[in-house]
Image (spheres, helix red, strand yellow):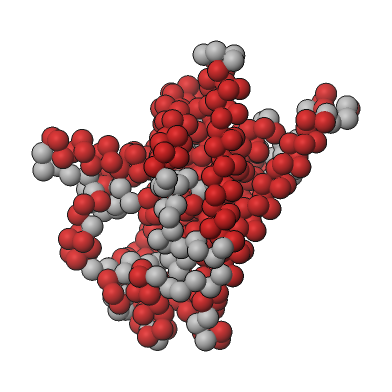
Amino acid sequence: MPLNQNFFTNPPTPSSATNKPSTADRFLSIGIVCGILWYLVMCVVHLLSSRPLWNDESCVFQSVRAFHSADFFKEPLQALQVFPRVYLFLIQKFSQPFSFDLISLRAPSFVCMVLAFCLWLRIASYELKSKLSYLTFVLCWSASVPLIYYSAELKQYSMDVLSGACFIWFLYNQEYLEKNHRQRYILLLILLPLFIFFSYPTYFFVLFPLYHLILACRKDKTKIALIVLYTSVLAIYGILSYLFDMRLRPEAILLREWHDYFISFQSVPEFFKTLGEGTLNLFTRWFVERPKVVKKFGLFFVMLGVLRMFGGFFVHIKKDRFQLKTLHTIPLIIFLELLFMGAVQKYPFTVPRTSLFFCPLVLFLTIQGIYALKRIHRTLYPIVHAAFLYFLVFVSIGISFYVLAKTFGAQTALW
């Protein structure tokens, strides 16, 4: 995939390059820019509101305020918190000169979410060829309570979104980088796994580049050197992460506190209950929780995304020569990884915030699921797409009132 393609829109086709854009195209382009600014303004206003630290943030802040530098890498965090140590250490060093001002504590989360948003705009342009679909994706962000709220919270979830976005961008460009920018490609193979120190969900993505190297090795044995390099880097980073981070987590206490958030095997009904709840949370909690009628209205659109996750994978996996490098095949593998980790009680399956990195994938799948309605009935697609756009604008406006009124917090009436 060419790296010099326009950031926000796809390159013009030969026909559109010679003709002036239509009025509809101009309006859609304006809408895309306005949608991007809308989301960014909401995040900025949310950050500058300086709302008081709520419970989880206060617990994290105890370690930020009390720890000396070495403590982050040899002591359990206070208040039974789980937070990547290197990232938390950097937050302390950044906010300390500002006397731990609220904005300085949350600024790293803000930067991560904005960078993730920009990177996802690039990724979306690879797949969403029409400006209308692209506009829909942009509006999904401004209609998402968690994607706005976690842009200014003293937690690691925006970093999770950024980590996932970096890996997916790399997967789209892996072949191009190797052929045209080999030094940059090798550097990225070494640097990308560093996200392990900043985001635990990075472990869900690190095997994708290795899988592609192994596939390519069947035809090109020179890839063995890259496989050795990448696996060595993963092993070194993994060992360091265990020694200075994961080893210090209070696993027994966390399992007791989080036992309701894993896949249960106590009985067949419990298994299907936890599986169903977890799957619903992964797909349905990315817009608003309240009013319930609005959430149920959005549920219809998102269920199309669930169907698309399975259908798109089996349609594209052979077409992509069994490579897992696009938004058509990656989501199902991530879903299965989350399901497996929830089953072995290593990562909560039913907590939306810990799976925030999965949210942009759901947004894309939803748009693709709606687009797939074209194959069912030509009239059905525009009706459903228009209804989804109205839904997004309605929810975005509702969120904006709370953000501008500075009442947008962890306990907001929308979430």
Position of 32 with respect to 80 (left or right) is right
- Residue shown at 50% from the left, 27% from the top: 369
**Which residue is located at x 34 percent, y 74 percent?**
59
Near-viewer residue (301 or 228): 301
Q: In this orientation, does residue 177 appear?
A: no
As drawn, is 160 to the left or to the right of 260?
right
| Residue at 11%, 43% in the rendered image | 266
Quarter of the rendering containing residue 388: top right
338 displayed left or right of 327: left
- In depth, the one of 396 and 244 nearer the eye is 396
In the image, is 62 to the left or to the right of 142? Answer: left
| Quadrant containing the N terminus in the rendered view | top right
Coordinates of residue 27 in the picture (x, y in percent):
77, 36
Answer above or below: position of 284 versus 347: above
Q: Quadrant of residue 242?
A: bottom left
Residue found at the very far top of the displayed protein:
377
Residue 33 appears in the figure:
yes
Front one among 265 and 272: 272
Q: Where is residue 152 in the image (x, y as percent from the top left)?
A: 52, 65
- The percent coordinates of residue 123 (x first, y second) are 60, 42
